[in-house]
Image (cartoon, helix red, strand yellow):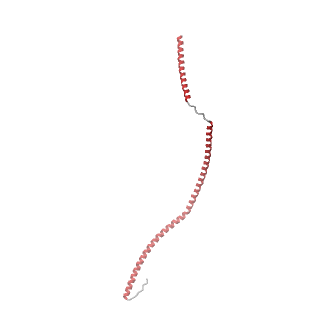
Amino acid sequence: MILGVCGIVVKELAKTLAQQQKIQKQIGEIRLEINELRNVEDPAPVDVRILEDEVANLDQKITELEAKKVELSQSADESKRRLDAAENDLRNVEDRIRVAAQKLDPFRERLARIDSEIDRARQELKHYEQKMKEFEAKLADIRSVHAELELGCKVIALRRGLTFNFLI
């Protein structure tokens, strides 16, 4: 029975030793964590006034940027309105140009016909000037032959004692 009690006590002792080792291990881990926490530097205390000043500055910048945004938005809207107006004016001018060009079409056609007639008249003038030169050359040849014939007739008449008056 003593042995039975001793066996129980030994088992209890082994169990208690295992628990003790487990607890000591946990104690060691906790001590390491405590030392690590002691080695961590505490952050400097934050001055609330500085943070409030930063918030005020940021609020002011936000207000300025919102005002600038509104101003730029209005400017963009005005620019868009002016662009739309300019595009409408451009379309109106293009339409007027198109209408004017359509009104000019008959005049262009007439001008093209007149240019064609002028070219034809120039060609005819050139042709007739060439014919005139040819005619004048023939006329000069005829006059030359006539003058020679007249001179020959006068010479013959003089030889015969007659005088002739040629009118040509």
Q: Which residue is painted at 54% across and 20% down in the image?
A: 20
Percent x, y for residue 70?
62, 47
Q: Which residue is painted at 40% across and 81% down in the image?
A: 147
Percent x, y for residue 145?
39, 80
Image quarter of residue 161:
bottom left
- For the N terminus, the quadrant is top right
95 w.r.t. 34: above or below: below
Q: Is residue 43 left or right of residue 125?
A: right
Q: Which residue is painted at 62% across and 39% down in the image?
A: 53
83 w.r.t. 148: above or below: above
Percent x, y for residue 137?
41, 76
Percent x, y for residue 94?
56, 58
- For the C terminus, the quadrant is bottom left
For the residue pair 165 and 50, the one nearer the viewer reads as: 50
28 w.r.t. 61: above or below: above
105 w.r.t. 33: above or below: below
Image quarter of residue 160:
bottom left
For the residue pair 88 and 42, the one nearer the viewer reads as: 42
Q: Which residue is painted at 47% across and 70% down in the image?
A: 122
For the residue pair 92 and 26, the one nearer the viewer reads as: 26
